[in-house]
Structure formats: structure tokens, C-alpha cells
Image (cartoon, grey):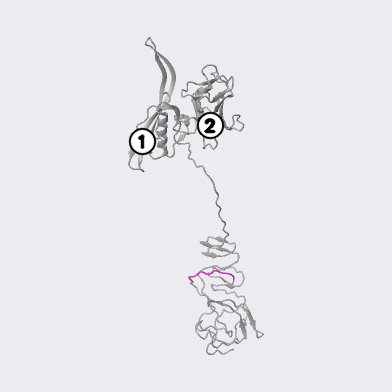
Amino acid sequence: MTILFEIGYLETDYLVGIYFQGVAYDGLGMQVDRQIADSLTIASQAERSINQPGVVDSQAERFVSGVTETLSEVDRLLVVEPTITLSEADRKVTPAPRLTLMEVSSDRIKQGDCLEFGYQLTAYLANPYMAGYVCADLLMQVERKPAIFKPTLSEVDRKIDATKELLSEVDRQIIDSLSVLSQVEAKKSKSIGAQVRKVLYNTYNLRILWDFPSRGTTGTNWTVTVGEQSPGDFSVNNLNTDVVEQAFRTPSLTNCTVVCDTQISNGVFVDTIGILGHNLRVTGSIRVEGSQSSSFSDPELYILRPDGTENIIWIAPTIPLTSYRYWRFTFSDAGNSDGYLQVGSIVFGSAAIFQGENVVDTIVKTPKHFADKVMTEGFTAVSNDRALKNSVTLEFRSLDYNRENYALLQQIFNYCRTSLKALWVPAPRTPTRFGLFGKLATIPSEQHQAMGDDADYVSFTLEVDESL
């Protein structure tokens, strides 16, 4: 055993003296090849050359039980919730260390002989690791860097339960973890140019059809097959008048077809159809087709069913995405007791639809006895009883003056006044319950509550009467 003199193996405070400077004694004749980076870490204990025979060249593998660290050059499995795993593989160490790993328990090791046991003279790890004394004939001083608290560092596949932090470059399955750091493949996003048409559409709020592309630009834009129009004043162009009693009539009880040319080259988007003053029974049907071709080579089809009232009001369930110039209506009601089919007016187009706001829930509906009376020279009255008509009273409360809903009503008031009819549908889910084709009884008086640009509200009540 080599005797240590002025500066020897661990005879001074650990790492206080200049590393391997002064007197160094090599009792085994061992030459260790190492690399030291930034004065922090001895890179390897791996390569060495032994000049004397009979000396074990390396302690390559070790397994320490009953302690909190596991050192290995190969893949390992963590056992008993280890707090630290060090590997000779690639690792990433984060600052803020809490534990320091040392191979010695103090800065000075008792020198002894190797008679009882020593460095690999007994079975591998059969005795407590570095307990009691150790033969330290190797002039080797290793500097370690403190490890962080609770990392798991490895390049191997593993499954870890209930861990707090995982660092890995490989596939893993992690259960109940709080923080997972991983290296993934990033995909570059692409920019796609698009043009989107956004519209507001609903089938709940008040809608008003007051502009009728169904009447074309001339008012004589309807055609009917020869023989399917009754003689007399029952022209198919009567379908364009506001006077519902001035009707179109046909002797055909099945498959009577009339065609409307809207005379609008780009076509019409139709979300509301009103077929007014008809005599079809609930067993009858109306087939409606739209097409850009007068031959209807590729039509879009709708089927309308009478509900027992004299009006049919159809509301598109979704906003129409295609416009058509030509519209064809085919009426059928075999066995109609009148012996003919009759329709007063047909209106269709895109309605003005309230968004967000609506009429007050209470709607007043008033039946009216509608009759024409003419005084004769004998001062007697001749009456033409034309049955019952309806009127509805709608209340608008606190409409926002700056929103589109109020502007729509103003546009309708200015255009229709009290002389033109419009199709008013207060409850589109049950359209014929309150819906009617009528005129404004009066242009309503408005109550404005103007408290500022963002607090300007309008309230009023209007009456629509189909007997006018």
C-alpha cells in the first residue's frame, strides 16, 4: 500500500487542493484517461489502461439497494418510488438542486489494508457500499455536480405512474402526471384564402314580405296551359293583384300548372310563399318548382299542403342558397265539390326578417265582417256580403333606433303607406295563425325615448287589416 505524503488521495479537504498537482502516487500503476469540461464534471471513468496484471480494471456495473439512487449504464426500472435516477445516457439537468450525490460520506477516508475486504476482493456488492473502510490505492479524485430534485432522466421507453415531472425523448405512456415535457414534431399551419357569405336567418321572429318579385316587371308574367283557365274574368294574371277576390280559376281538378317568369335574369331567392284565397281542401296539394330554365330541366321541388284555411303560407326552414328565375305551381284536388280550383293571389320572395328584437308576445286578432254596400236611386242599400276578414294589432316596445329592425319598418311604412298590401307573418312557426295579407290601417305614432346615441328606443303599435 502506497504511503501518502504532502498531498495525497483525499488527505486535504475534498476538491480544495489543485486537482492532481503536487505529489501524486500511483500505487497500482493505473493510467486513467479522462476529459474535464468547464472544471465541473469528470467526463468518464470508462477508458483506462492497466499496466500491472492481476488488477481489476473497472467497476463497470453497480446496483445499490436500500438507497435513493440507482446508477447504471443500461436501461433500468425504477423501484420503490426512487427520487433520483442518474444515467450515463443523454440527460438534461435543471438548476435549483436539492440533493447532492457523493460516493463518500465525508471528506476524509480511513486508509486501510485490503486483507478483510476491499475493492472487488469479495463478491460484488456483497458488503455495504464503502462502509467501514476502503482500500484507496487509486489516485483518483472525482468531482460531481449536484442533481436536481425528483427528475426521471432516460432515453428508454417506460411507463411511470403518479409522477410529477418527466423528461424524455421517446414514446411514453404517462398516467396521472402533472407536468410532461416532450419533443414533438411541429406542423406548419397553412393560410387558405376564402370568401364567406354570412347572413342572418330565423324562423321565429316577425317577417314581412312587402316586395313581390313574383309580379315581375310588367304584371303580366304568368302563363297557363291552354284549356286550364276558366272563361270569364279568371285570368292567370289575376294572381298579381292585391284584391284577393279577383281570382284565377281552372276547371282542371288535377295537375293544373301555372308558370311565373320573374323576369329577373339572376333569379330570386325565395324564403316565403303566400298562396291566398284558394279553395283547395286538406286532401289537395300544391307542387312548387324553381329553375333557371323555362323548360324546368333541373328543378328544385317543394310540396305545399293546405291546412284547412283559405291561405297557405310557406316558410323556408333554412335560408335558400340558390336563386331561380322561373317558378312553376301545379294544383291538384281531385273530387273538389266546387267543380273547379281557384286561387286569389300568389306572392313570393325574400321577406324582411326581424333579428334579435320582435313584437310583444300579446297579439290582438280581430275578425271583421267584410261587405260592399252601394246606395241606389231609391235610397236603398245593395250589399255584397264577402264573409269575414281579419286584422291583427302588433305592439313594438323599445326597438333600438339604431338597429336594422326599426329601419326596415320605416322603409315599409314609406313604401306601402296605407294603400299597398304586404304579407305579415308574426309567428312563422304557425304562419297561418296570425299571418295575413293586408294594409296598414294607419301609419302608427311613435314614442321615442332618446337618452343618448346608445340608448335611443322607439315604441309604437300598428294594425294590419286584410279587409281594406
For mark 1, does the 10 Å Cα neighbourhood hold few (<14), some (14 to 19), or many (20 or more) residues? some
Could you tell me which residue is drawn at 43 percent across and 17 percent down?
385
Residue receiving disc 1: 459
Amino acid type shown at disc 2: Ile
Q: Main secondary structure of the magenta part?
A: loop
Expressed as whole percent of the image width and height from the top left, the position of residue 213 reads: 50, 30
How many angstroms separate mark 2 from mark 1 (CA)? 37 Å
Name the secondary structure under disc 1. strand
Residue receiving disc 2: 264
Against 104, is 230 above or below?
above
Nearer to us: label 2 or label 1 = 2
Could you say which is closer to the camera, residue 260 or residue 439? 260
Name the image quarter holding the C terminus.
Answer: top left
For mark 2, does the 10 Å Cα neighbourhood hold few (<14), some (14 to 19), or many (20 or more) residues? some
Name the image quarter holding the N terminus.
Answer: bottom right
Contact, mark 2 vs mark 1 (Cβ under 8 Å): no
The boundaries of the magenta stretch are 89-96
Against 438, is 125 above or below?
below
Task: State which quadrant residue 290 falls in.
Answer: top right
Could you say which is closer to the camera, residue 262 or residue 51? 262
